[in-house]
Image (cartoon, rainbow, N blue to C red):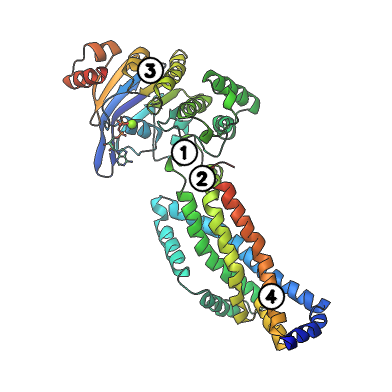
Amino acid sequence: MGTLWERLVLEAPEFFNSYNLLFLAEAAARTLGMTAIGCSIGFVAGLALAVLRGSRAATLAPARWLAVLYVETFRRIPFLVILFVVLYAIQPLFPDASLTAIATVAICLLSTAYLSEIVRAGLESVPRQQLEAAEVLNFGPARALFQVVLPQSWRVILPPAVAFAVMFIKDTALASHMGVVELTFAGKIFVERGFSPVLGFGAILVLYFALSWPLSRLGAYLEKRLAPARHP
Amino acid sequence: MPQLDIRDLHAHYGREPVLQGVSLSAERGEVVGLIGPSGSGKSTLLRALVGLTQPSAGEVLVDDRRIDYRDRASQRWLRERLAIVFQQYNLFQNMTVLRNVTIAPLEIQKRSKAEVEALATTLLDKVGMGHKRDAYPDELSGGQQQRVAIARALALRPEILLLDEVTSALDPERVNEVLDTIRALTREGITMLIVSHEMAFVREVSTRVVMMDHGRVVETGPPAQIFDTPREDRTRQFVSRILRH
Ligand SMILES: Nc1ncnc2c1ncn2[C@@H]1O[C@H](COP(=O)(O)OP(=O)(O)OP(=O)(O)O)[C@@H](O)[C@H]1O
Ligand SMILES: [Mg+2]
């Protein structure tokens, strides 16, 4: 124990130099950025899929069927497999695409599938009669969605959607397998450069916690705040 | 020329026929009371009129214009003239009372803010809900929500108003508040179709009463005829049973 402690004290000044801190910050930003962009785009695309699946027009039947196929497929493929499929599909087409961008595309694809299910459950939680009332008042479909249905769905959508994003902060670690320098990869690099794993991965651990803890708290807050009432 | 003319209207829920050739009409300013046993298709008739349930045959004319329920523009035209108050109120839960009343006149009908807010204030006062204009629906009793729903429908300035059992979810004391509101409306010349189990009320406000059963019109006549000297046995049975309650 003494030797480990001595080693940490010895390495610490070198580890926490400005270059390494910048490197860590960049890796953390990449982890957060990929998650935030992937989940945001995934939310918008998931909303579109959920609305499509809830539509009744006969002409949209083939599109509905494709949406179901998409969601059910992507929820059953391991994220790592999606990452590599996207990598090998994109690289020949766009040789200059950065690994981070490619990983973000993979995150979008997966989060679209999951978030569309979360959004769908939210939309379905609003009684049909709310939509009928909007319809007879001559609301168009978009207005009914954004002014009546969606505002009443947030309390059902937000808690699991935030939980999903929190989980994804961790899952982006898989992108290190294809060479994206996010937090986990950064930890590996430190260890390879000879730093103690306690120091290297300890710093990573703290950063993962710092990224996801506020988001988890936000999720818990929203859950509490939105649970009882149906209005803001 | 009747303002509302329903001709041989049919509707199905799945394979089950619910309306089997309903014909009835209402002149401008007329108040038609719609009575009949539970499941006879009264609500379905109102839903079909506003286009929430697609009719499978027959036609509906408003101001002599035939409504094409498959056509968006035709439906929109219809819904600019006709408002419905649902049995379950269906106020928007995410909006205040005032917003519920003003949203469609402001944002759909594009009427001026000053005019709409003045009218909404008048209407909410008239139904005794002026003091609750900033409350949300889930903070109101059933009777209060019902009265707001009536104000919301009237704020549209409809020419025809459909009311579905607007008192059935209310406790007896509240029933009178809502009935008073409707009674006042009948003096304003709006054409109304009123579905109700309150026979005394139907008799009082209707210019004509329509008795329905099994998706068909059994008998139509002035209130005195339907309630005192019905021509059909089915009407006599129904009226005598319900009046004895
Ligand atoms: N959404 C639905 N799906 C299937 N069948 C329905 C649906 N709504 C109503 N029905 C059926 O249609 C028939 C007519 O119902 P409707 O609600 O129009 O009757 P009603 O005269 O309004 O009755 P009540 O006085 O009880 O309100 C009933 O047999 C009912 O079971
Ligand atoms: Mg009914």
How many numbered discs sit on the rendered protein?
4
Left or right: where does residue A9 sit relative to residue A146? right
Residue visible at 39% across and 29% down in the picture:
B169
Query: Mark 2 CB in 8 Å range of ligand 1?
Result: no
Residue A57 percent coordinates (x, y): 41, 50
Who is closer to the viewer here, A98 or A210? A210
Query: For the residues carrying marks 4 and 1, which lies nearer the camera in this image?
Result: 4
Who is closer to the viewer here, B141 or A82? B141
Other residues around mark 2 within 10 Å, as few (<14) / some (14–19) / many (≥20): many
- Which residue matches tag 3? B31
Image quarter of residue B130: top right
Q: Are marks 2 and 3 on the same chain?
A: no
Image quarter of residue A87: bottom right
Specify the farthest residue to the left. Answer: B233
Give the answer, above or below, for where B127 lies relative to A41.
Answer: above
Q: Which mark is residue A149?
A: 2
Who is closer to the viewer here, B90 or B27? B90
Say which amino acid is labelled 2.
Val
Label 3: element kind: strand
- Which residue matches tag 1? A135
Q: Which mark is residue A204?
A: 4
Q: Earlier in the sequence, mark 2 or mark 1?
A: 1
Give the answer, above or below, for where A60 lies relative to B44.
Answer: below
**Distance CA(mark 2)–CA(mark 3):** 34 Å
Residue B210 percent coordinates (x, y): 29, 21
**Which subunit holds the residue at mark 2?**
A
